[in-house]
Image (cartoon, grey):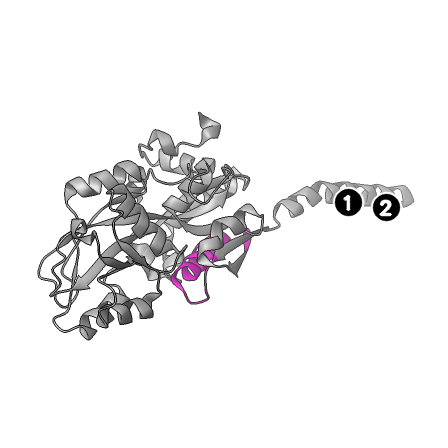
Amino acid sequence: MKRKIINILLASIFLFSLSVPVVFAQERTALVFSGSTIGGVTNLQMSGLAAVAKQFCNVEPTVIVSPTLAQVDIMKDGDSHFCTTYGYEAYFAYYGQDRWEEPYTGIRSMLPRPNATVQFAVPAKSDIKSVQDFKGKRLCLGRAGFGGELQSRTILEALDITDYTPVNLGHEDSLAAIVAGNADVYSNSGAFPHPSFLEMAETISGGIRIIGFTEEEINQIVERAPFFKAREMGPVYKGMTEAVLVPEVESMIAVREDVPEEIVYCITKSFWENREFAEMQWAGFKELQLEDVAEIRGSSPWHVGAYKYYVEKGLDIPEVMIPPELK
């Protein structure tokens, strides 16, 4: 009887030892998602993605607040696993261009975000009709070093427009400068209609116009900076009478290359196939279309996990976006 009890105990211990790895495997993976100010768009976007990761991919997410222009830096320093960024910032980081003196080859793309439209506004009565008329003018491009300023400057450089006076002011001060006649053009980046331009259109007598680009100008911009693309913008502001063609910049969610493939695959797949979880945090995700992923070429390469999902869905991914690990 005593031996029987001992055998039962030994068998129980053996079975328990077998179950331990299974218990450990079921533990959630702790990952950090970096967005900007609480309540801001990018913070809501990352909260939505974190909800998807927790619901479907056994992830224990933490959403942190980081400066918009330092998102990639924070991820590079190891303080986050995912971050919001623009395609050009991921592109510059990966290839070691612009402010990146050394390539950050550990950055990968995972998901698109709704693109940001770059808009150059003037009073409706202004004699400035095209970007070629910017020469010799005073342009409010945004605060120096901020995203909007970089985007506007990149567009102008691509068009070889350098003979202008940059005015580096924030949104409110830019509007005040235009109203006071101390600046001629105000540029901003974001969705349209943009709140700053709505206010500008109501403040200035006669409203405003958004300067349109020709197809040739857009092609010239894209050739030099492939993270831009064309977008038709309707007459959404007081003073506009027709639709115009404007550049928009690809916006991305980036991930560290060392995040396991199976986790990135799960989050990518779950986001596209259960988007209602993300949309509960930020309704703007509804704008995204899976087929548009195949058009993205101005960012860092896709993470292997994301790439495998997109290939499974039949998307033809451009060569420049294929993960280097698979080449």
Residue 69 higher or lower than 312, as above or below: below
Of residues 195 and 56, the one nearer the viewer is 195
Residue 193 higher or lower than 60, as above or below: below
- Residue sitting at the far top: 327
Q: Dot 1: few (<14), some (14–19), or many (≥20) neighbours within 10 Å?
A: few
Residue at label 1?
Answer: 12
Residues shaded magenta: 35-61
Q: Is residue 302 magenta?
A: no
Mark 2: secondary structure: helix
Q: Residue at x 32, y 70 (%)?
A: 172
Of residues 190 and 98, the one nearer the viewer is 98
226 sits to left or right of 25: left
Using the rendered view, name the quadrant where residue 192 is placed.
Answer: bottom left
The residue type indicated by label 1 comes to Ser
Q: Residue at x 32, y 66 (%)?
A: 171
Q: Which mark is residue 247?
A: none
